[in-house]
């Protein structure tokens, strides 16, 4: 094996033939492997000198053969995440639709496209109408001009911008670090929701993100890739200049110009002021010019920001000034990035800290390779800091904008992963920290599902109710996948023996030795006590039928009776289960030859795939009218008209070739829908469906809910005035507003102020089966039944009291969950108020009194007939086991 200066490099790790690659530094410049000294003296604090420490030699470049395909892999991932899905999701009305319509008008007036729409505004928009730089709109307009008015034709140019940004980032890291780092960065960026969702929608900010990536790559390579290839460095300089120009044309001076130029320029200033190295004319001139451009752009950009007003759009600012209802805090950008970069937002904060360590690429920081590695770190960290500062400074005037430099965060993640593959230490803290942050983000997604819209960077968007449960489930699966792989990948650096018997016996022996055996004696005593308690409870409850034991909470009784066998399992199984998973990962890494860093990137790729190809398409289906139009095209017969209520008429041009009737209010839409016995169709938003349903039930014909033929989205639905015998309605009110009286298990009639007749109640389990008793801490449904006697003014809420044994369960809630207000209830309707509840674990066995009724503030709806206690309907008893 060849050696460097007589020093033999480390031996190869054993593994499959196709993965036998030296586990040492892989650099991107084969001819520039630097010689190193045998050791390097490091000055100690206070002028004292430490003993010299040995330094690892730098080995010649040996790259895996498959890395020759890295550019194709980058292209493939980009095509998969950006181009493949651009036509599958419909246009988001109004956010995406507004951008598309402005671009259509540009296509008509600038590129002479034949896209004029009757009754629509076809004039040339002004810059103030755009609210940002014109380049994103021009790009979409070119797509419309070339391929027609389709959602995919407008998105295609933006997807190509996304590809250029990923390719630029790969180029930057492959030149300043190595190809593997470049590949990792490209994959990380491609799997960030903020990036790929803007790359395949017409929101426009992908142009800014790609431009900043191009500017950083071009200027960074031109300045720091020394000696490099002169021609390619000049090409890089041109790419950097192009990125600055396109960045300015998309988001103005501060975002489009100042962030990349100041980021690269400051990195150059730090390096030139802190290292002893040979001056390289091209790099120094480029760095100085870049820094000067950054300072100038920042100066003039801040001036434009201070002068900008809502009355006049500033092309220098690149964003529309608007008064903010809530003053943004300094952490606004970080707050939104936490959810829009998932899963990498849980990894990047720890990766930042690891970048402050010495680069593993070379023994001497003053060599070309060391300067390149250091420069990349400085560019990523300084550029990110500049980016956060710029967006935070702009937020008080322009609100939240999509962060334009996710490429730098991807670079930070990639470099830290590459360091780990080389000589950086493993980190249990990183794995545990990622798990904690992912748990925090998961909690946010469950409690505030609208966080799923953060990647779009839009304001006042509503998250669809029907998607909340599925969204939480998908985020949970994605989080678990990423956390498990990252935790066990970073748990250790090298594989140790797996499934070693002595290793598994370490934990029991540690318990025996703890506190000089005191812990073992305490656990043994606790086990004996639990056995005695279990025997006593069994005898008292099953044989002696003790009332005291019967009154214990079911949960407490279950825990005490099963504690004797659960304790040993809790002591050993969790630890051994974690060790088993760890050993499975050791086996995987050994026999596949896949590095732990590569596994981390793979976990991000899989987790990002779950979001990209499952979560966001399902969310988009809820937000776009595309599926409604497709259902209309499939279901309607020739001559059956379509109307729109609350759905943008502009979307018709993308999905429907026929004429539609636009309606501005619910009453007009209802009159049009029901004015003929012939079948008609109406696309309606969820907020108008309730009133339409109420008007439909108020007709003189037999009571019936409005037929909903496409209710897949809780936001936009397709309704009709006629339901054919072979069709099934998907009206969300079918289970709560009934035409006939349903079966009632506990019939309790009470007249509520001559407006409602209470019919009774039921308790059902999760499957909808009626139950006679409940168990604490389990979820059930309490169903209340009413018949409407007269109009019921006001917004009454429901209370449910379950009283007994000095305990009360208080089930106050909005009637029908607030989905169908009282003013929509029609005389003769049967109403089912379904409320999910679970009793606290401290509820003991026995029969509890049940009371319920309606209230507003301190006032209860009066009970005029029927048994009641202070206007609380006496409903009987509920048995608790």
Image: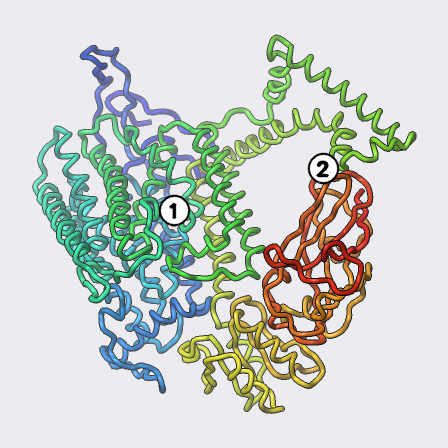
Crowd around label 2: few <14 · some 14–19 · many ≥20 (10 Å): some
Give the residue at mark 2. 842
CA distance separating discs 2 and 1? 39 Å
Crowd around label 1: few <14 · some 14–19 · many ≥20 (10 Å): few
Q: At x 80% / y 40%, what residue is drawn?
A: 845
Observer-nearest of 343 and 486: 343
Quarter occupied by the N terminus: top left
Residue lying farthest to the top in this orientation: 516
User: For the residues carrying marks 2 and 1, which lies nearer the camera in this image?
Assistant: 2
Q: Is residue 768 left or right of residue 579?
A: right
Q: Is residue 161 above or below residue 880?
A: below
Question: Where on the picture, by quarter, is residue 159?
Answer: bottom left
Observer-nearest of 638 and 51: 638
- Callout 2: helix, strand or loop? loop
List x then y, in percent, for residue 689: 56, 73
Q: Which mark is residue 526?
A: none
Q: At x 41% / y 46%, what residue is drawn?
A: 338
Q: Which mark is residue 335?
A: 1
Question: Where on the picture, by quarter, is residue 239?
Answer: bottom left
* Mark found first going from the N terminus, 2 or 1: 1
List x then y, in percent, for residue 183: 35, 46
List x then y, in percent, for residue 104: 31, 76
Q: Is residue 674 left or right of residue 268?
A: right
- Callout 1: helix, strand or loop? helix
Residues at discs 2 and 1 in contact (Cβ within 8 Å): no
Observer-nearest of 618 and 242: 618
List x then y, in percent, for residue 666: 52, 79
Residue lying farthest to the right in this orientation: 543
Q: Is residue 579 above or below residue 138?
A: above
């Amino acid at each position: 094996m060849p050696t460097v200066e007589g020093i033999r490099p480390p031996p190869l790790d054993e593994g499959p033939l196709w993965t036998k690659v030296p586990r040492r530094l892989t650099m991107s410049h084969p001819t520039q492997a630097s010689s190193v000294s045998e050791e390097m003296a490091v000055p100690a604090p206070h002028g004292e000198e430490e003993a010299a420490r040995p330094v690892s030699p730098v080995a010649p470049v040996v790259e895996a053969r498959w890395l020759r395909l890295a550019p194709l892999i980058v292209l493939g991932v980009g095509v998969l995440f950006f181009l493949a899905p651009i036509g599958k999701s419909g246009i988001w009305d109004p956010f995406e639709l507004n951008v598309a319509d402005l671009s259509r008008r540009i296509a008509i007036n600038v590129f002479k496209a034949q896209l004029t729409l009757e009754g629509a505004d076809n004039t040339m928009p002004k810059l103030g109408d755009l609210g940002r730089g014109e380049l994103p709109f021009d790009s979409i307009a070119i797509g419309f001009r070339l391929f027609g008015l389709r959602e995919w034709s407008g998105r295609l140019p933006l997807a190509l911008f996304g590809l250029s940004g990923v390719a630029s980032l790969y180029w930057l890291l492959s030149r300043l670090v190595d190809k593997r780092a470049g590949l990792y960065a490209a994959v990380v960026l491609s799997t960030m929701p903020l990036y790929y969702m803007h790359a395949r929608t017409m929101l426009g900010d992908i142009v800014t993100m790609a431009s900043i990536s191009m500017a950083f790559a071009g200027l960074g390579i031109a300045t720091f890739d020394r000696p490099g290839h002169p021609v390619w460095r000049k090409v890089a300089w041109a790419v950097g200049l192009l990125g600055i120009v396109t960045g300015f044309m998309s988001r103005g001076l501060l975002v489009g110009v100042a962030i990349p130029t100041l980021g690269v320029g400051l990195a150059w200033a730090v390096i030139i002021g802190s290292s002893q190295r040979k001056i390289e004319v091209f790099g120094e001139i480029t760095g100085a010019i870049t820094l000067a451009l950054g300072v100038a752009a920042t100066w003039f950009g801040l001036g434009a920001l201070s002068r900008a007003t809502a009355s006049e759009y500033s092309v220098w600012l690149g964003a529309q000034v608007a008064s903010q209802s809530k003053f943004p805090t300094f952490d606004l950008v970080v707050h939104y990035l936490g959810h829009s970069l998932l899963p990498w937002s849980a990894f990047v904060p720890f990766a930042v800290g690891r970048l402050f360590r010495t680069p593993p690429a070379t023994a001497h920081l003053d060599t070309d390779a060391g300067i390149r590695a250091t420069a990349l770190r400085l560019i990523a960290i300084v550029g990110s800091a500049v980016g956060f500062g710029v967006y935070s400074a702009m937020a008080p005037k322009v609100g939240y904008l999509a962060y334009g430099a996710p490429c730098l965060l991807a670079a930070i993640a990639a470099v830290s992963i590459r360091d780990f593959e080389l000589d950086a230490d493993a980190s249990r803290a990183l794995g545990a920290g990622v798990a904690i942050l992912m748990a925090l983000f998961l909690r946010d997604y469950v409690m505030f599902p609208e966080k799923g819209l953060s990647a779009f960077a839009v304001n006042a968007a509503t998250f669809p109710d029907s998607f909340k449960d599925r969204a939480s489930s998908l985020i949970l699966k994605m989080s678990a996948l990423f956390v498990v792989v990252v935790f066990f990948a970073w748990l250790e650096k090298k594989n140790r023996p797996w499934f070693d018997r002595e290793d598994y016996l370490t934990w029991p022996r540690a318990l025996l030795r703890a506190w000089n055996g005191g812990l073992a004696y305490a656990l043994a005593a606790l086990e004996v006590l639990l056995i005695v308690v279990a025997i006593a409870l069994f005898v008292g409850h099953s044989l002696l039928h003790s009332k005291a034991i019967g009154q214990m909470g079911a949960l407490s009784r279950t825990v005490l009776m099963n504690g004797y066998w659960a304790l040993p399992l809790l002591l050993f199984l969790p630890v051994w289960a974690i060790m088993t998973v760890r050993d499975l990962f050791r086996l995987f890494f050994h026999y596949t030859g896949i590095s732990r860093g590569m596994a981390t990137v793979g976990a991000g790729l899989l987790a990002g795939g779950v979001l990209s190809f499952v979560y966001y398409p399902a969310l988009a289906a809820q937000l776009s009218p595309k599926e409604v139009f497709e259902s209309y095209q499939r279901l309607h017969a020739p001559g059956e008209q379509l109307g729109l209520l609350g759905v943008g008429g502009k979307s018709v041009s993308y999905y429907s070739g026929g004429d539609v009737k636009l309606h501005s209010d619910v009453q007009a839409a209802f009159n049009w829908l029901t004015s003929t016995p012939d079948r008609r169709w109406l696309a309606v938003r969820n907020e108008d469906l309730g009133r339409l349903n109420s008007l439909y039930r108020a007709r003189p014909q037999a009571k019936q809910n409005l037929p909903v033929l496409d209710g897949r989205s809780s936001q936009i639905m397709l309704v009709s005035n006629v339901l054919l015998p072979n069709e099934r309605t998907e009206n969300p009110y079918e289970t709560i507003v009934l035409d006939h009286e349903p079966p009632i298990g506990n019939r309790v009639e009470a007249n509520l102020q001559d407006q409602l007749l209470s019919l009774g109640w039921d308790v059902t389990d999760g499957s909808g089966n009626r139950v006679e008793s409940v168990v604490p801490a389990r979820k059930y449904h309490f169903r209340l039944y009413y018949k409407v006697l007269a109009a019921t003014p006001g917004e009454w809420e429901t209370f449910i009291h379950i009283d007994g044994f000095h305990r009360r369960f208080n089930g106050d809630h909005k009637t029908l969950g607030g989905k169908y207000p009282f003013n929509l209830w029609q005389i003769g309707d049967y109403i089912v108020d379904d409320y999910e509840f679970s009793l606290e674990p401290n509820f003991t066995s026995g029969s509890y009194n049940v009371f319920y009724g309606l209230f507003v503030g301190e006032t209860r709806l009066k009970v005029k007939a029927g048994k009641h206690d202070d206007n609380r309907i006496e409903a009987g008893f509920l048995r608790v086991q």
